[in-house]
Amino acid sequence: MVRVGIVGIGFMGMIHYLNYQKVNGAQVGALCETNEKRLTGDWTDIKGNFGPAGQMMDLSGIATYTQLEEMLANPDIDLVDVCLPPAAHAEVVIKALESGKHVFCEKPMALDIASADRMVAAADANGKLLMIGHVLPLLPEYRFAVEAAQSGKYGKLLGGHFKRVISDPQWLPHFFDSEKVGGPMLDLHIHDAHFVRLMFGMPTALDTQGRWRGEVLEYFQTQFRFADPSLVVSATSGVINQQGRSFLHGYEIHFENATLVFEFGVLADEGRSIMPLTVIPRSGDNQQVDLGSGDPMMDAFENELNAVATAVEQGAPSEFLAGGLARDAIRICHMQNESARTGNRAEF
């Protein structure tokens, strides 16, 4: 049994806590949070853009701390789960690794490449696992695409377009602060940067054009370039200032023998499957994919935490959780910022 200490009880900390209850190989043994009200179990003021609302929690049997160092000194904790704002990730992750704990950290792993490098180096130096919570490959529509690419089911992967656009997240403080959250690039598009890296490998160059809000890109489009010139990959992401559509994501992925299309949105607080995952084959009828029932988002987090527990037990993370892959996603995002800022192609 992997004993987990969660650092940071906000929306994502709550989502992790709830999903650990469903993981057979892990159990939350400690919580660290400076808001002492939340350490009493009163999470009623927590809110987010999916999942259940915050509520009163029974924290019986769980050790609670306001100081990270005290939790790290607990010998019963095997894994530290970091759900703090991105600017705090590097310091806390490195301290946890140096204290002899494995670490699972929410995305983005850091706000800059140097911090991401230090985190990976600390994991290597201390012989501990560093896993980053990029949950997108575990959502059923995206998992289907990964499995299709890895299996060669539809032939060679030719490219695709990825989309992730939200309305202004007015409930999220500091979203557009480059030194605290990182804006749409590092808090939103990072999902697709990671997925592009997972599916196609590391780009060799990219071109990005976008609109700015202060020091961060608000809305942007990118054309990625790869060593294989036949790969045609692009992405659109950012914030629109119309609150009626709070979320939209999807893709069109091209293979030699089929195209996968998918799009989901939230309009007027109602989730809508705009285009269910559909396979358009080279010949024959289109095929809508049966992805089963359940809550795709919460199921994906449960699957992610199952993978985290398995990684600790086996001593090796799955590919999509690896710290090196997440670091590459940070680098891609910074190159996109550079291209948009200079108006030139960014070369890796």
Image (spheres, rainbow, N blue to C red):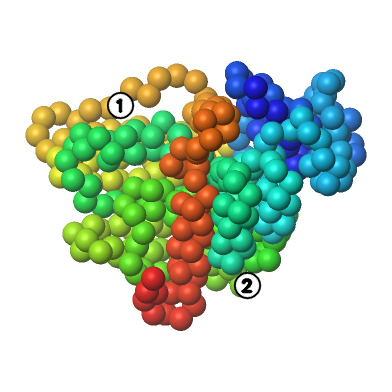
Q: Is residue 88 above or below residue 136?
A: below
Left or right, residue 15 beside residue 137: right
Task: Identify the residue at image location x=43%, y=42%.
Answer: 319
Q: Is residue 24 above or below residue 258?
A: above
Task: Identify the residue at image location x=26%, y=52%.
Answer: 159
Q: Where is residue 256 drawn, in percent x and y? A: 15, 44
Task: Check disc 1 and give the amino acid type.
Answer: Val
Tag 2 residue: 214
Left or right, residue 123 beside residue 100: left
Residues 36 and 211: in front is 36
Residues 155 and 219: in front is 155
Task: Identify the residue at image location x=33%, y=22%.
Answer: 290
Which element carries disc 2, helix, strand or loop?
loop
Q: CA distance from mark 2 to mark 1?
A: 42 Å
Task: Identify the residue at image location x=83%, y=21%.
Answer: 61
Determine crowd level at label 1: few under 14, some 14-19, many 20+ residues with C-alpha closer than 10 A: few
N-terminal label among 2 and 1: 2
Task: Check disc 2 and give the amino acid type.
Answer: Gly
Q: Quadrant of residue 117?
A: bottom right
Tag 1 residue: 289
